[in-house]
Image: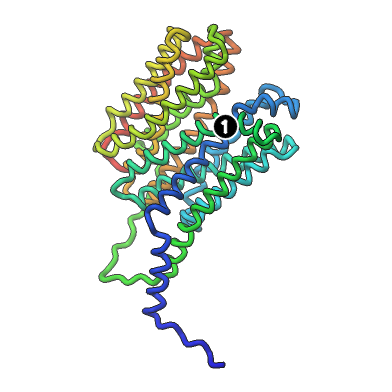
Amino acid sequence: MSAARAVPPALDREVRTRSAARFAHPALLLAGIVLVALNMRACLAAVSPMVAEIQRTFGLSATASGLITTVPVLFQGVGAPLTPRLTRRFGTERVVLGAVLALGAGVLLRVLPSVAALYAGCVVIGVAIAVLNVSMPGLVKREFPHKAAMMTGVYSTTMLVGATMAAALSVPLERALGGGWRASLGAWSVLALVAAVAWLPQVLRARQERTAPVRVAGPVAPPKPVGSPWRSALAWQISVFMGVSSLLVYTLVAWMPTILADHGMPRGEAGLVFAFSNLVQVVGAFLVPLLAGRMTRQRGLALAMAGLNGAGVLWLLLAPVSGAWFSAAVLGLAQGGSLGLGLAFIVLRTDSVPGAARLGGMSQAVGYLVAAAGPVGAGALHQLTGGWDVTLVVLLALAAVAAVAGWGAGRDRTV
């Protein structure tokens, strides 16, 4: 038997190029982004309706139960600065795949019959989400350079849809699967697996593109060095805007139904008001990045989001029951819009993919560490004062801080 004939270089290059092209279809990329984004909030929102059952299962105190939702937020802040280094070493596609698989593993770890496993799963989930939070803006900027703001709206909206879906389905899943809270929460690992399978073509495409030789027609300018965003005033303004906006979201996610119930609203109605607010967030998360992408400066948009946050909190302070539905609508629009605008700032205020990754790492590290203090601080103020008025006044002041930071972040400059 004669030895196999060597493949001509030109034919080998054509085969690799065609192989990469098979996985480069925009529909495959869009499906992958949407399915990954669905996972980025679902496993956090799914646990909220189950906290009381988890507490009873392990005999946890109220403080220890609160850590089930606080630990992932904290570790989103801790994990965010590590992501740019990972993407430089392994490539964005492989890092996203690894983060989605880690997310699914964290979901399964969280439902094992051990308190240590419960909190370890929360840590893994937080770090995995941090990696995805930082990777996605740079990937969107690279793959959709002329539609980055629009695609930011698509995936930020999808994140909120995933959260709403998870919160709504957790209890029905518990009943349908018949395995208690563990079966309900563990089921979300299937969504992570589906997202990993949908993302695999992007990993294969990136691998083919790395092995394919590249012909250069002329001299290539050296890549522009990317400086540290930690020394940039603009980067700090973006980070503060994201941090304070996230603090407002997480604080009201933790306490808004309780605030309404403490003022006399039936708990069932308070839950409906809260669900309505989450639904309206989807509208803000989709529309605001679209508007941001059509503007050279987003100062007015940032002020509008901060102003709506302040108006919603003020109405909650002045008319907590009679104005609850109005507050929910205003806060939902402001919170979803602030999330979308913060993510849009990452792609609009940078001029390179590595720059977007570094700014994303910084802004989300600062943002989630600040946000993690919100629910705990609000609970402490409530316990200290015996009411919610002081807490809501502090949130009003923080909305003003977000307005100042957003005014700076909305300038037509790059980090």
Residue 50: name its quadrant.
top right
Residue at the outermost bottom position: 1
| Image side of residue 381 versus residue 367, left or right | right
Let me know if residue 198 appears in the view.
Answer: yes
| Image side of residue 142 versus residue 392, left or right | left
Q: Amino acid at mark 1?
A: Leu
x%, y% of residue 238? Answer: 38, 35
Give the position of the C terminus as an image quadrant: top left
Residue at screen point 46% across, 54% down: 92
Which residue bears the numbered disc 1?
A: 169
x%, y% of residue 227? Answer: 38, 49
x%, y% of residue 73? Answer: 55, 34
Residue at screen point 36% across, 39% down: 344
Residue at screen point 56% across, 46% down: 192
Other-residue count near label 1 (Cα within 10 Å), few / some / many at <14 / 14–19 / ≥20: some
Residue at screen point 40% across, 20% down: 329
Above or below: residue 247 compared with residue 388: below
In the foreground, 224 or 293: 293
x%, y% of residue 20? Answer: 41, 65
Above or below: residue 78 compared with residue 14: above
Let me know if residue 232 appears in the view.
Answer: no
Instruction: For mark 1, give the secondary structure.
Output: helix
Give the position of the N terminus as an image quadrant: bottom right
Q: How many marks?
A: 1
Above or below: residue 365 compared with residue 388: below
Residue 44: name its quadrant.
top right
